[in-house]
Amino acid sequence: MIKRNQPTTYRQLAALPWPDSAVQHTASSAGHGRRESRSIKTCGIADELGGIAFPHGRLALRVHRRRKQTGGCESRETVYAVTSLDAHETTPAELAAAVRGHWTVEALRHVRDVTYAEEASTLHTGTAPRAMATFRNLAVGLLKTLGAINIAKTTRAIRDQPERALPLLGITNNPDTQGT
């Protein structure tokens, strides 16, 4: 997904010849008090078009979403994405599913940032940032596996009573009375 915080790439994608492309896939859904429809267009990124400021980008996507809350106004949003796949390697429906799946990853990132203040971390050198992200992912995954619905609430409960953490990892505080 290319967001507006990547202005050069976003501008390049928005400038592709989208009006000349037909909608290649549409999907609609209803739930959570809203109706949503999505359409997707694809456009090959040819070197002679000047390329896109995205390494190995071969195919650009334009997803247009319309969302209407029950009893509310309709909102529209257009997002862009880039993939290294060529058009013959995938279908628009598969790309649409991948874009929807992307939001699952964004949800995890949101949990990591809100619950564990990941973006406020002062670790910036070496492998420390990657290691801490791994630990945060491990914590979220473990809590979800154990059935936690509210990760933030469960994390606070463990923070307030740290002795609750070890049994979650299968570690008990039973000293070996037999010796080693």
Image (cartoon, grey):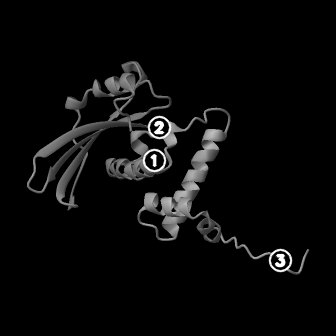
Residue type indicated by callout 3: Asp
Estimate how packed mark 3 is, as few (under 14), some (14 to 19) or many (20 or more) residues with alpha carbons within 10 Å: few
Residue type indicated by callout 1: Arg
Front position among marks 2 and 3: 3
In the figure, 177 relative to 159: above or below? below
CA–CA distance in space, label 2 to label 3: 55 Å
Where residue 120 sits in the image (x, y, percent)? 50, 37
Where residue 163 sits in the image (x, y, percent)? 63, 67
In the figure, 48 relative to 169: above or below? above
Estimate how packed mark 2 is, as few (under 14), some (14 to 19) or many (20 or more) residues with alpha carbons within 10 Å: some
- Considering depth in this image, is 150 or 41 the residue closer to the camera? 150
Residue labelled with disc 3: 176
Tell me whether the residue at label 1 lies in contact with that at label 3, contact meaning CB atoms closer than 8 angstroms. no
- For label 1, the SS is helix
CA–CA distance in space, label 1 to label 3: 40 Å
- For label 2, the SS is loop
Q: Earlier in the sequence, mark 1 or mark 3?
A: 1
Residue labelled with disc 2: 84
Where residue 150 sits in the image (x, y, percent)? 41, 62
Front position among marks 1 and 2: 1
- Considering depth in this image, is 157 or 116 the residue closer to the camera? 157
Residue type indicated by callout 2: Ser
Q: Residue at x 49, y 38 (%)?
A: 119
Residue 109 tag number: 1
CA–CA distance in space, label 1 to label 2: 23 Å
- For label 3, the SS is loop
Q: Residue at x 46, y 67 (%)?
A: 148
